[in-house]
Amino acid sequence: MNRIAEEALDAAARRGVSYADVRVVESRTRQISTKNGQPGTLASSESTGAGIRVLLNGCWGFAATDDFTGEGLARAAALACDIAAAGAAAKIKDVRLAPEDKHTATWTSPCAVDPFSISVEQQLALLLRIDEELRRTAGVTLAETSMSFARERQVFASTSGSRIDQTRTTSGAGYTAFSYKENELQKRSYPNSFGGQHQLKGYELIDELKLLENAPRIAEEAVALHTAAQCPEGRFDLILDSSQLGLQIHESIGHPIELDRVLGSEANYAGMSFLTLDKLNHLKYGSEIVNVVADARLEHGPGLGTFAFDDEGVPAQRIDVIRGGLFTGYLTSRETAFEVGLGRSGGAMRADGWARIPLIRMTNVSLLPGENALEEVFGGDGIYMETNRSWSIDDKRYNFQFGCEIGWEIRGGKRVRMLKNPSYSGITTEFWNSCAAIANSDHWVLWGTPNCGKGQPEQVMGTGHGASPARFRNVKIGGAYGG
Amino acid sequence: MAESELLTRSACREIFARVQDAARAAGAPEVEAMIGAGANALTRFANNAIHQNVAERRLFLSVRTQMDRRTARATTNRFDDASIRAVVEEAAALTRAQQPDPDLPPLAEPADIDEVDRFCPSTAAATPQDRAEAVAEAIDIVRQEGQTAAGIYATNQSVEAILNSRGVFAYYFDTLAQFSITAMARDSSGWAKASAPECDALDIPGLARRAARKARLSAGPRELAPGRWTVILEPSAVQDLLGQMFWDFSATAIRDQRSFLTSRLGTKLFGAGIQIADDAYHPMQSGPPFDGEGVPRRRLALVENGIAREVAYSRKEALRANTAPTGHGFPLPNEIGEAPMNIVVEGGSEPLETIIGSTKRGILVTRLWYIREVDPYEKIMTGMTRDGTFLIEDGRPVCGIRNFRFNQSLIELLNNVEALSPAERASGEEAFDMVGPAMKARDFNFTEVTRF
């Protein structure tokens, strides 16, 4: 891989570029799933390729290839340069980059148990046991389980002299029990919806998740939802579990702080952001107890947004996004950092494999733990919601609506009855300013969102979101089923 | 027979011969291979300048072996002999580790497949300079309106082939050009998009003018109260919204009781004027005329006179139901079975302008965004309007409005249709391209309004 990176970089450098970087990526995945006791997907994949990014005449060009012959790499480098040259037809100013030191490093993410060393038979046997356990509950009409594993090694080389060799291993697992009855379909998922929990770990994650132990409860809840009361419509105090709060952070903080969105680069597809530059260090984003960071460092935890260097060779960093409720920082790249006068990129450029250009992506955007005991978060009356079922937010990230799989009416700090079809909606800054209590670090979980889409052509990225349960005052609830 | 230079038929046969040799050596003679190639380029612009400009070329080989009612898949992008041996051995090893599936059919047998021609040489030959010049012209149109442009111009070519050890050889190649543009004014925006196999068929200046006009006409948006409104959805909005429901027109989804058609197939669900087909051979459609096992696609009458009639069957699901497969199965193994992917919603006779002209009061929607399912059985979807939402009064758009959130049952929507424009090839961002009309419907449920 080093040979390929050097050869591709040389091919670009020979064409007079002002800057070039090459990422040679080798990836391996395994996916296993079951459905109602029968095998589902069982697939593995391997892919190797190189992405060449050049800056020529002030314009970017990018070409990707899986042809590693000298001729193939030279052709790709030439195409990247041709593409950059064509950019002059619609150029306003030269691209400039915030400075970055030269780095030489080799880094491998912690992985106690290599998931690819565990036999497929063993992995499948666990999923089938969970599947069986889910269907043991009368009324469960569909049980689905899954595991996924990925390892990606990337060699990064740039004309600035950086040479970085990184290997990341991620694992994920989860399941869902569906119950269809009398024209109503309910579901419960564990440990989270949309594939469960995903982290930068090896197979040890699967053992930590206590998948089998939770299956009976999840199955019973899926069936019980049919006889639960409909979630009321109105304004109530809302308590969110940490997984739903993780997605709330993703949509209403993580995306709006992407500086490329703010500057208009994503206007045609993912959209822009209400966080215009004048709001930095001025906007009261949340209440005083709201502290949010974007932290790619391993010290933050084994998140899907954890790495040693981003995909333009900038070291992992912690950025204060919201401090004491005040908006204080964006996710940035070298180009956007220069554009707004920052001295350095915050290191948030990430690419979906070798065939895509790096974009500003979330790292681990997390709500820091509060000081409240869990009993204090649940104290008084309100509605508690767990596990996302639907999510939607406008293209500037003001108005959101989320649905959850299950809700509970809280009276005097106690769960008094189950509620079905819970949903809530609001305006981003009003919501975060209504945050009244955040549970302490004993209840903080770093969740993985494996399916964040952005860019054209679209790229899918894994992001991390740490959160503990929190209470929000006077939130609009139940509107999704209203009217 | 025509073929793509990216990956010829003979190249596919040569690769598959090596796959078969490796499969026999691995003790897995029942083998299927999906071989694909792509050469995709995309020029992206924002703030009136090209800012991301990319190209990729790739090949892949995905091998599925089958033995004793077990099957599994392994995929690679390396084509040397050692890599092909390794991917076949990986597929065989996974297959042996797999649990048997009593419903798994044998590999597909060869069948005649009608060819479709969706390859355009000028799209395949488009250069970075060609795209840049077209983009520069579009930007100039928007800039002359005092607005800012963002968008993409993509020219893609791809090849997909499926071969198996029983003699199936399905081969398809195409091109696809896409252009989309968002024009942004101080407090408003407009959007337009089109796609076609032929890049010359895209009226790029026309799309730029349309987006700019929408941005100009929606300036100074008013805030209206949410509620039940008569709505006119342009074809892209219809496509992105209705496109969410066709995953449910699947025999597997019905058997799993996760489809809104569970217990409803054969019943009148929608208004009598609603006719929806799946037709891979429609001249405005795209994609291969065969499915993930190489089975030829059959035309399906999904909805006739408002009645949910036919659904898609993969080979496995067809075997269970003792019926014929429809050619809509996904590559095995998978959990979701099958789905129609070439939707054609029959249009009406009134042009969009006439529909707007006959509307006393309503909302005109250019585009929808972030559509997600709220209730799977009532098919309630939520989402936002975006990039050109207008109040119509007395037959004409009178002003732009701040964008609405909706929570709308698709079943209810298709019972409230009042007019349809002629169908066209519609292209959005949240569902597969579709052939469909603009749609006027009463009592569309807007539930909230956002800040812009």
Image: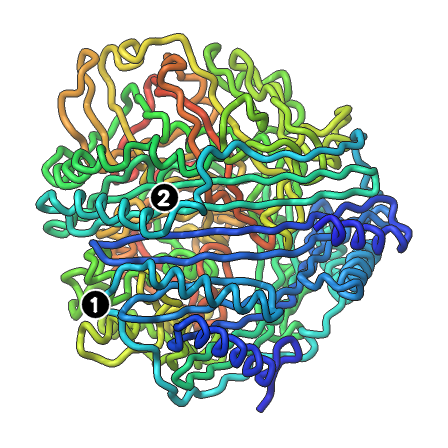
Give the chain letter at badge 1. B
Residue, disc 2: A194
Whether residue B411 is situated above or below residue A396 in the rendered picture: below
Q: Kindly indicate the quadrant of the structure image that contains residue B431.
A: bottom left
Q: Is residue A277 left or right of residue B437?
A: right
Residue A380 locus on image (x, y percent) = 23, 11
Whether residue A161 is situated above or below residue A370 in the rendered picture: below
Estimate the spatial distance between the alpha carbons at disc 2 and disc 1, rounded to whole Å.
Answer: 27 Å
Whether residue B331 is situated above or below residue A360 in the rendered picture: below
SS category of the residue bearing label 2: loop
Residue at 78% x, 30% y is A100
Label disc, if present, on residue A135 of the rendered structure: none
Residue, disc 1: B102
Q: Which of A214 and B180 is in front in this view?
A: A214
Residue at 77% x, 53% y is A61
Mark 2: few/some/many CA within 10 Å (<14, 14-19, 20+): some
Residue at 37% x, 49% y is A119
Could you tell me the amino acid type at mark 2?
Answer: Phe
Residue A269 locus on image (x, y percent) = 57, 49
SS category of the residue bearing label 1: loop
Residue at 57% x, 60% y is B193
